[in-house]
Amino acid sequence: MAERGKCLIENEVNGLQTDVLIIGGGVAGLTLALKLVKRRVNVTIVEKDPTLGRTYKGELIQPKTISIFKKMGLLETLNQDWRPLQEIRAKEVVDDRILVDATMSYRVLEQGEDYAAMMPHNLLKKRLLDEAQTFPTFTLLRPAVFEKMESAHKAIVRMDKERAVIKSQFVIGAEGVASKLRSYMNVDFKRKFYNHDFLTVSFPSPESLTKGEMIGTPKRFLGLFPLPEGRVRSVYLIKKGEFKEWRKGSIQKFYSHYTSLMPELEGFVHQVPSWREIQLMVPVRLNVRRYVDRNMALLGDAAHSVHPMAGEGMNMAIQDADVLGELIADLFEAGREEKVDELKQYEHVRKKRVRFLTALSHVSALMYGIGGEKWQRARALAILRLVQREVLQGKYMYNVSGLGMWGPSLLDGLQVIGLGKGQLRRQTMKQKTFSRLDDYPWQK
Ligand SMILES: Cc1cc2nc3c(=O)[nH]c(=O)nc-3n(C[C@H](O)[C@H](O)[C@H](O)COP(=O)(O)OP(=O)(O)OC[C@H]3O[C@@H](n4cnc5c(N)ncnc54)[C@H](O)[C@@H]3O)c2cc1C
């Protein structure tokens, strides 16, 4: 029920007092907890799932997230668990014709962590949890369901059939898209669904697959990303609702969709034994109007959800946790934990970055989500320009990396239509890269 760091028996949970109560032990909640306990803040996580979860929930770790883990002293462990990813090849095919075959690289960043990494989601959670549990100020209540707030500092949590009150200075909603704390905070949000879904599954990889691969056709998209231990993660775009029909037929249909786009997958994708292994991913874009209310804050998917095309959701969740964790730990260290108004600094730093990345993911979603040959030709041209013009590739990789924000310019537009040849100004990239004071402005 309650796990080490601090070990509690059930009847000690009622009336438990903690500095920070985190609802949800996903990547956001666990990263936040680890940041805080490392600085001796008392943390309790309430997690309803008795396990670390079994579903796929993203595996691509972007450079900014890698730099956060590095600062948290986790790089040595994670280096052994993940597979670095430097290049992504984008191919557009129509019938047997290749319209474009181009490779983008994180190396264009030429600074800090100029690579991404692939790591199973649940293994990342395990590493964060294992580390947090070495600290005596960490408590995990699991399985335990957060039900509601009795007041801003008192949460009602159900374990088995018992209800307990937990008192806390700060309460953080890290419970994913269906956040109950968000409702209590009475926070509005905007939500958008898309006209397509994705299927995702991992299977043993052919040795020839060493880069990320994205293959587009007028109607389809297949993404392949090498994982550790000789496996590959695949994502396949389908029309909304199509999966239900597909599942009624033989799985051979699924295999042939893959092998028609990449014949090397013959014999590999066939190791997916049944439809049951294949997960449906329904993309949603969600942004809340505010992240903070008094002593409460929303984190990760509870505050924003993003189309998965640019691989940002998990990264934004971890990057939120980095900023919020630093802020709360600083407040406790300075004895200013009563100044709950200061939580707004977290929203101030994160909200504009999140909006920027959700917009970028939305554009990537439109690029692949709209079907037809004309649209595909336009997409092929955009991909071609992206690799031909260093400045376009540099800006794109820089923005998805999370290292900074570098918005589009008129000159970029001209380059996409083939006019002008701008150089990538590395100096500008460095200047725009988020510094410690950009991430934690209150430390001035
Ligand atoms: C299929 C899929 C594929 C994805 N692919 C990618 C990708 O490639 N790259 C990427 O960066 N992101 C990806 N994402 C997004 C990414 O998974 C999320 O953005 C990220 O997991 C958000 O983390 P979180 O901790 O905020 O929320 P979650 O991971 O949703 O964690 C919330 C936790 O809260 C718990 N919880 C919920 N309600 C309660 C309650 N009432 N009481 C107690 N506990 C509760 C849940 O059990 C869960 O453990 C994907 C998501 C999905 C679903």
Image (cartoon, rainbow, N blue to C red):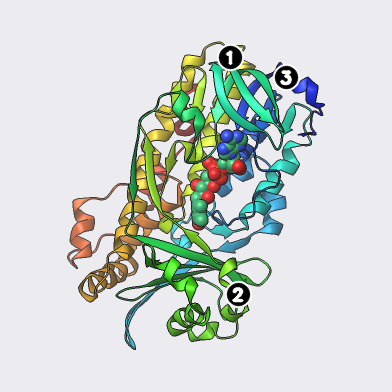
Crowding at label 3, few (<14), some or many (≥20) Cα neighbours within 10 Å? some
Between circles 2 and 1, the one closer to the viewer is: 2
Does the beta carbon of the residue at mark 2 sit less than 8 Å from ligand 1? no
Q: Secondary structure at mark 3?
A: loop
Q: CA distance from mark 2 to mark 1?
A: 51 Å
Is 264 situated above or below 242? below
Q: Which residue is mark 1?
A: 337
**89 or 30, which is in the foreground?**
30
**334 or 365, which is in the foreground?**
365
Q: Is residue 53 left or right of residue 8?
A: left
Q: CA distance from mark 1 to mark 3?
A: 23 Å
Q: Which residue is mark 2?
A: 272
Q: Is residue 349 left or right of residue 377?
A: right
Between circles 1 and 3, the one closer to the viewer is: 3
Q: Position of residue 293 (x, y in %)?
A: 45, 20
Is 257 situated above or below 431? below
Crowding at label 1, few (<14), some or many (≥20) Cα neighbours within 10 Å? many
User: Closer to the N terminus: mark 1 or mark 3?
Assistant: 3
Residue type, numbered disc 1: Glu
User: Closer to the N terminus: mark 2 or mark 3?
Assistant: 3
Q: Secondary structure at mark 2?
A: loop
Q: Which residue is pictured at 66% across the width and 72% down the height?
A: 230
Q: Which residue is pictured at 47% across the width and 80% down the height?
A: 253
Q: Residue furthest bottom?
A: 96
Q: Which residue is pictured at 34% across the width and 89% down the height?
A: 96
Q: Which residue is mark 3?
A: 14
